[in-house]
Image (cartoon, rainbow, N blue to C red):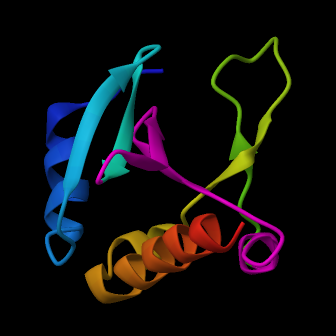
Amino acid sequence: MTVSENFIEFVLDQLSQLDGISTRKMFGGLAIYQYRVIFALISDDMVYLKVYKTTIEKYLQADSKPLQPFPNRPAVKSYYEVPVDILEDSEKFTKWVEESLFAQKEK
């Protein structure tokens, strides 16, 4: 679970339209928060967003995989990888993040 500084910088730049973004190192990866609400994890220079019943279908349709930080342990099915084409488009990525945050509030 490594995370490069360049990748962190890229992801935070992609999220620059959102207020209240902060990060915290976590088990060799990085957690991303908005106003102390965790919504994403970075592991091995991949971004994983928290998914819910209302949001998981789009990840499955995009062939996203759940977070598996350790090869000998089960996947963490509450976080799915963000497709590269979404991550590279700051508007689309921000929309996916907002959907995740909204689903969290509606939970």
Task: Please tell me whether residue 107 is drawn above or below residue 89 in the rendered image.
Answer: above
Occupied quadrant, residue 75: top right
* Residue drawn at x 76%, y 68% as measured from the top left: 63
**Residue at the limit of the structure toward the front, as seen here:** 106
Q: How many marks?
A: 0
Identify which residue, 39 or 15, lies in the foreground. Answer: 39
Residue 37 coordinates in the image, percent (x, y)? 42, 49
Eyeballing the image, is 15 above or below 40?
below
Q: Nearer the viewer, residue 62 or 25?
A: 25
Q: Position of residue 58 (x, y in %)?
A: 73, 80
Q: What stretch of residues is rendered in magenta?
A: 35-61
Q: Is residue 8 left or right of residue 107?
A: left
Q: Tell me, yes or no, whether the highlighted magenta stretch contains residue 28.
A: no
Q: Is residue 13 above or below residue 30?
A: below
Do we see residue 79 in this rendering? Answer: yes
Is residue 59 covered in magenta? yes
Relative horizontal placement of residue 79, taking residue 94 as reference (left or right) = right
Name the image quarter holding residue 23.
Answer: top left
Q: Position of residue 66 (x, y in %)?
A: 74, 47
Lateral position of residue 50 relative to residue 22, left or right: right
Q: Is residue 85 visible?
A: no
Q: Position of residue 33 (x, y in %)?
A: 35, 48
Q: What residue sits 61% from the left and 64% below the top?
A: 104
Q: In screen coordinates, is 24 left or right of 77?
A: left
